[in-house]
Image: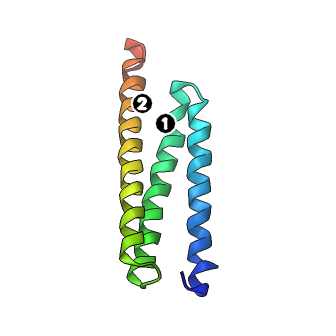
Amino acid sequence: MPKNHRHSLGKRIDTFFVEIIEALATASFLSREKKLPYVCLSIRKVDTLKIFLMILWETKSIDNKKYIVLSEKIDEIGKMLGGWSGQLQKQNSSGKKPEEK
């Protein structure tokens, strides 16, 4: 990665990876009702991470092979988070008392 991107966009990408891990670690230890905001935060950060990686690829700062490998892994993470989010939404809505619906 070129030096100018390594210290700007590259550093921001590293920060997003850490923030995603922190949000997911937090969500994993919370009760079911409190997990959803952290999962949603992770989804937003993963989406932003995808955009930053696309910028690196478009500017030819990472080669195709590295971009493809990273994109596939991040897409898989996004799908897993989407499934977790859907499951939490379904559980939280079905777990409410009838008068709360």
Given residues 98 and 11, the one toward you in this image is 11
Numbered disc 1: secondary structure = helix
Which residue shows up at 42% across the image and 85% down it?
Answer: 59
Identified by mark 1, the residue type is Leu
Quadrant location, the N terminus: bottom right
Residue 91 in percent (x, y) is at: 39, 23
Residue 2 shows which numbered tag?
none
Query: Distance from label 1 to label 2 (Cα)?
Result: 6 Å
51 is higher (above) or lower (below) than 7: above
41 is higher (above) or lower (below) than 13: above
Q: Name the residue under label 2.
A: 88
Given residues 61 and 83, the one toward you in this image is 61
Counting other residues with Cα less than 10 Å from the Cα at mark 2, is it few (<14), some (14-19), or many (20 or more)?
some
- Do residues under tags 1 and 2 come within 8 Å of each other at their CB atoms? yes
Residue 97 in percent (x, y) is at: 42, 13
Q: Mark 1 points at which residue?
A: 36
Residue 72 in percent (x, y) is at: 35, 58
